[in-house]
Image (tube, grey):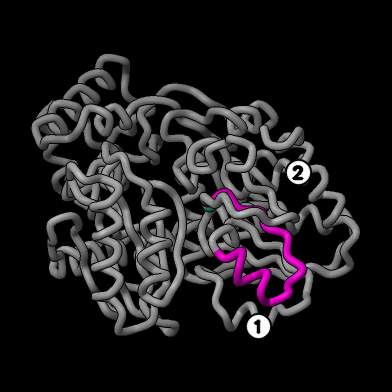
Amino acid sequence: MGRGMGIVEKAKEIAEIIKKKHYITIVAHADADGVAAAAIAKLFLEENGIEHEIKFTNHIEEELLNEFRSNDILFVDLGNSSINAILNHGINAIIVDHHFSNDFFPNSLNPFHYGIDGGEEISASGLMYLIAKKHADIALIGAAGDLQDRNGFRGLNGYILKNSNVVERNDIRLYGRNLPLPRMLSFSPLIPPFFKNFGMSVRFLKNIGIDTKKSWNELNREEKKALLSSMVKMMAKLGYEKDDIMQIYGKVYELNGYDLREIAAGINSMAKYEKYEEAIHACINGDYNKMKKFMVAHRKNIKDGIKIAKQNLNERSKIKYFIAGKKIKDTILGTITGMLLEGERIEKPLVGMVENGNGIKISVRAPKNMNINLSIAIARAAIAAGGDGGGHKMAAGAMIPKGSEEEFLKFFEAEIANQSPSL
Ligand SMILES: [Mn+2]
């Protein structure tokens, strides 16, 4: 705990600062956690009679900062990697972000300043919960969106769980547990061979003699055991790490009968299609059914994107990378980079690059067993290439000017070599 003040006290201080404002622009990251954090911020401002508007972005651009000059801005789920730029633009900022940064900013709620790992123990929506002291359910949607339920909600997330309506139990960790089994299996990116492969899921079930019309919830104990052990065997045969295999069974979280990851995936899909208002509405009102059509379209784009990334995959001694131009939508680059790394079991940091209206957007992901800090590596390489970046230890992103891709790759690879000489 830093300088005698804990994160809860700091959250209270930030709440008081917010309450004194008259008009706030909420600037949120365009993903599930950002939407959930913005939804809590919106409710908090409404409850305190503060006028507001909400903007979503994937990245803090110079242009955006110019527009904000001297306004009261509440950044949620981003801001930590742009503290200098925010200061330079004279913005009255409040930053509520869980991405790694040691930089000091007075009006910020940064878990790392209190020895709390923002990658594992709390998301931006969780930080907003600490400020609003309400809306724990929405906070956990954001945490699930950032996969902080991977090893069960712990730390501050565990505390939020206790104050929520979210139910925790042990079960198979796939959503669609009440859908016919082939749909449940082919729906989850957790098991790549089944992902979007309905036919293979049917054959797999028939092989072990399980009725393909039944849902997981309709299976008896023996059938569940048989299915699980066949899945484990198949994954082991395909060379999956024990850790990954163990992910298929464990803590699951449900809110009003919906799997929390399913809700988060739906909110995320809506954000990727820029349906921000609807996404916030879904978080607040719990009408998750509307999310479905976005999920279907989103999943098709992901499948197509993975194919393009694979076709453009290149290798250097310390890294793998793909440059996809405009063929992959920038909003799903992170998802695709992460899924390609997992699906192909790539053992080096993977860099994905696409072009958008502002330059080159970059996502990097590292294999779980690597002892590395991508957040630091990408920040340094991005600055060297004339851009900026940041993020988490195993997942990070950057923006650089068009034409400096090679420069970035060179510096990034050198940073990785520096951090992990034995690789
Ligand atoms: Mn987040």
Q: Between 84 and 147, which is closer to the camera in this rendering? A: 84
Q: Tell me, yes or no, whether the two marked residues, 2 and 1, touch with CB atoms within 8 Å.
A: no
| Residue shown at 70% from the left, 43% from the top | 129
Kindly state the secondary structure of the residue where label 1 is placed: helix
Query: In the visual, does 418 lie left or right of 58?
Result: left
Count the marks: how many? 2
Q: For marks 2 and 1, give the CA distance.
A: 28 Å
Note whether 91 is above or below 319 in the view shown: below
**What amino acid does circle 2 point to?**
Ala
Q: Position of residue 169 (x, y in %)?
A: 48, 23
Q: Which residue is mark 2?
A: 11
Residue 32 colored magenta?
A: no
Identify the magenta region.
82-99
Quick check: can you spot residue 259?
Answer: no
- Image point (60%, 62%), residue name: 79
In the image, which disc is placed on residue 66? 1
Residue 94 belongs to the span the image colors magenta: yes
Direction from residue 395 to residue 182 in the image, left or right: left
Q: Do we see residue 191 in this rendering?
A: yes
